[in-house]
Image: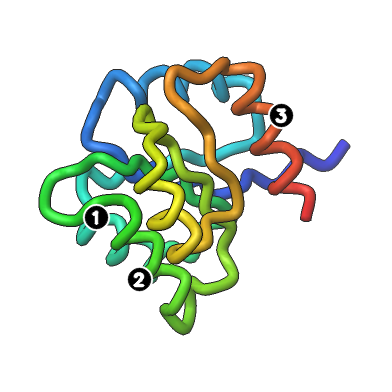
Amino acid sequence: MIPEKKKKLLVIDDESHIVDLIKVSLENEPYEIFRAKNGSEGINMANQLLPDLILLDVQMPEMNGYEVCSALKTGGKTKGIPILILSGQNHPSNKEKESQCKPDVFIAKPFSPIKLLTILREYAER
């Protein structure tokens, strides 16, 4: 039996407990998880790794997730990578920012690990 090729998942989040939760939720799944602690590091890693999926937090120091998303969606090598935004902020002004950066999915915090896994599987199969 040929082992399933692991998908590269880049998590851009400054909160280590969220990244730990994601890692635990995906420990039996075919994902190789990489972490960036801020937006600029995330953009650099995305350009180097060319991950299959990106999980991106909105509220971060230096650059917020919407700025990172816009940079990745307009970047040459990264524009086709699905971006799943994680946010605890569900404010009407964020809807405008979200529509400008065009993430593939918006996931509200707190999120269910099962829901996250379902969404990741859907995008990994594309």
Q: Residues within 10 Å of mark 1 (few under 14, many from 20)?
A: many
Instruction: Write the residue at 58% across / 57% down.
Output: 82
Residue 4 vertical placement versus 27 (above, below): below
Asked if disc 3 and disc 1 are in contact, CB closer than 8 Å, the reply is: no
Quadrant for the C terminus in the image: bottom right
| 58 lies left or right of 78 | left
Task: Place residue 66 in its image quadrant.
Answer: bottom left
- Check disc 3 and report its element: helix, strand or loop: helix
- Check disc 1 and report its element: helix, strand or loop: helix
**In the image, farthest residue toward the front:** 92
- Which residue bears the numbered disc 3? 118
Asked if disc 1 and disc 2 are in contact, CB closer than 8 Å, the reply is: yes
**In the image, farthest residue toward the bottom:** 76
Instruction: Write the residue at 61% across / 47% down.
Output: 7
* CA distance for labels 1 and 2: 10 Å
Instruction: Write the residue at 37% across / 36% down.
Output: 91
* Kind of residue indicated by mark 3: Thr
Q: Earlier in the sequence, mark 3 or mark 1?
A: 1
Residue 122 in the image: x percent, y percent? Answer: 75, 41
Residue 1 vertical placement versus 72 (above, below): above
- Which residue bears the numbered disc 2? 71
* Kind of residue indicated by mark 2: Ala
Residue 48 in the image: x percent, y percent? Answer: 37, 68
Using the image, tell me which numbered label, if any, was put on residue 39. 1
